[in-house]
Image (tube, rainbow, N blue to C red):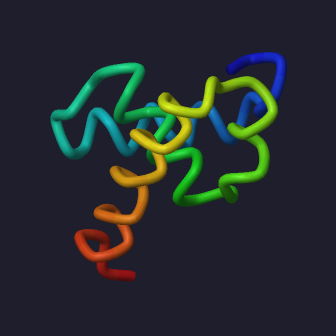
Amino acid sequence: MTKFYEKEQLLDGIRYCIETERCSAYELLAYLMYQYGEHIAKKFLLNQQYFNHLARSKEMRKEIVV
């Protein structure tokens, strides 16, 4: 992920994971996809992994109230 996301984006994702007490690489990447768009993750994930993370990022859209 460090090759595709900026340091501040990764820190934002890590903060989210800590705040929600869901600390995993899966949750971090799903958050990054939710927050910064799916197009970045599509560059490095295999299709099945991409769609799994995409499903979680769509769940986040419903869970996160801005």
Q: Nearer the viewer, residue 48 or 25?
A: 48
Q: Residue at x 28, y 76 (%)?
A: 62
- Left or right, 29 with respect to 39, comes to left
Residue 38: x percent and y percent? 66, 53
Residue at far left of view: 21
Q: Nearer the viewer, residue 48 or 64?
A: 48
Depicted 60 relative to depicted 40: above or below: below
Q: Nearer the viewer, residue 40 or 19?
A: 40
Q: Residue at x 81, y 33 (%)?
A: 43
Q: Quadrant of residue 4?
A: top right
Depicted 59 relative to depicted 49: above or below: below
Q: Residue at x 27, y 25 (%)?
A: 23
Residue 66: x percent and y percent? 39, 82
Depicted 17 relative to depicted 54: above or below: above
- Left or right, 20 with respect to 2, comes to left
Q: Quadrant of residue 59?
A: bottom left
- Left or right, 63 with respect to 10, comes to left
Image label count: 0
Q: Quadrant of the N terminus?
A: top right
Q: Residue at x 58, y 59 (%)?
A: 35
Residue 36: x percent and y percent? 68, 56
Depicted 24 relative to depicted 15: above or below: above
Residue at far bottom of view: 66
Residue 24: x percent and y percent? 31, 21
